[in-house]
Structures are given as structure tokens and as C-alpha cells.
Amino acid sequence: MLTHLEQFLPNNEPDSLKNYPFFWISQVNGRYSQLIEKSIKKLGIDNTRRKIILSTNALGQASITEIANLSTLKLTTATKAVYRLVEDNIVEVFSSDQDERISMVKLTEKGYSLVEQINQISQVTLSGILNAFDDQELSDLNAQLKKMFDLMPMG
């Protein structure tokens, strides 16, 4: 069935994982999360809140569901984290003009300040890694990862 792909799929051989692209995606994501978590600790936020802050910034203002989806978080996790961010005056929650049942989120001034700090920390933390690639390599990598993402059904 997938004979030409067998070398890229995990099997009973211990080393087979090293040829499996999703193994490396998972490894890179895990190491990235650890690096960023350690770096942002001084800001008093964790990785979940970082994701929500950056997703809210990217979306402008959005529902908690939209933020959870962009942040790759479960809705319940995102909801709890959003309300912790409200307590810390980092985001505001308000009812949607179109449907009052929908909770919308937007950053406060403190939230925008955190976006700048998070981005500065990310640049310092990751610039050495990204400098090992040229522009074309990074563009190609992004294109390949986006293609994989687009081919995956919504979960």
C-alpha cells in the first residue's frame, strides 16, 4: 500500500523513528517549547499564556474558540488561561456585538507590552538557530510544514 513510504514510517526497528518526519516535528516543538518556557519565565507567564497572548495579538480581537484553535490548545485550557490573563490585566473579555453568547478577547496595554517583550525574548533565544539557515531554506521549510498542515484533516 505505502511501500515507497515505509522507510519514513515507524515500525518495530528502534531506529525507524529517526526517519519519521512527525518524530522530528515533535522533537523540535518540544525543545522549542522548553527553550521559550525557560526564557519567558521572567515575564511571569507560562507557554499556554504566551500562546494566547500572541494569538490574540495576531487576531486583533477574537473569540476564545478562535484563540484556542490558533494556539493549538483545548478550549477548556484556553478558557481557564484567558480568565487568568483577565485577572492579570493582560486581556479583556467582552460579549460579541453579533452574538452576546460569544466571549470575545482583546489585549490590554499591558498585553501589548508583553507581546513586545515576548517577541524580543524569542528573537534573542532563536536567532542563533535561525541564522544557521539561509532565507531560501527557511522559506522551503515553512512551505513544507504548511503543506503537511494543510493535508491534515481538522481534528
Image: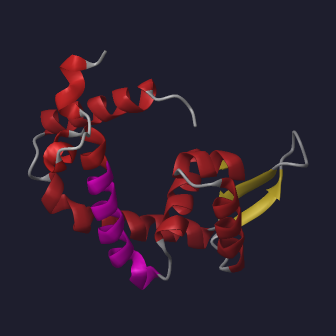
Q: Principal SS element in the magenta part? A: helix
Magenta highlight range: 26-43
What colouring does the structure picture have? secondary structure
Quadrant of the image for the N terminus? top left
Where is residue 140, by image quadrant? top left
- Residue 18 image position (x, y, % from top left): 17, 46
Give the answer, above or below, for where 80 lies relative to 150.
Answer: below
- Is 29 magenta? The answer is yes
Give the answer, above or below, for where 52 lies relative to 58.
Answer: below
Is residue 121 visible in the rendered image? The answer is no
From the viewer's side, name the closer residue of 95 and 18: 18
Residue 135 in the figure: left or right of residue 116: left
- Residue 42 image position (x, y, % from top left): 40, 84
Name the residue at the top extreme.
1
How many badges with numbers are in the image?
Answer: 0
Name the residue at the right extreme.
100
Name the residue at the front extreme.
12
Give the answer, above or below, for where 117 lies relative to 1.
Answer: below
From the viewer's side, name the closer residue of 94 and 29: 29
- Residue 15 image position (x, y, % from top left): 14, 48
The residue at the point 27 percent across, 54 percent down is 28
Is residue 124 visible in the rendered image? The answer is yes
The residue at the point 21 percent across, 32 percent down is 8
The residue at the point 27 percent across, 55 percent down is 27
Quadrant of the image for the C terminus? top right
- Residue 33 image position (x, y, % from top left): 36, 64
The residue at the point 68 percent across, 54 percent down is 75
From the viewer's side, name the closer residue of 90 and 132: 132
- Is 4 magenta? The answer is no
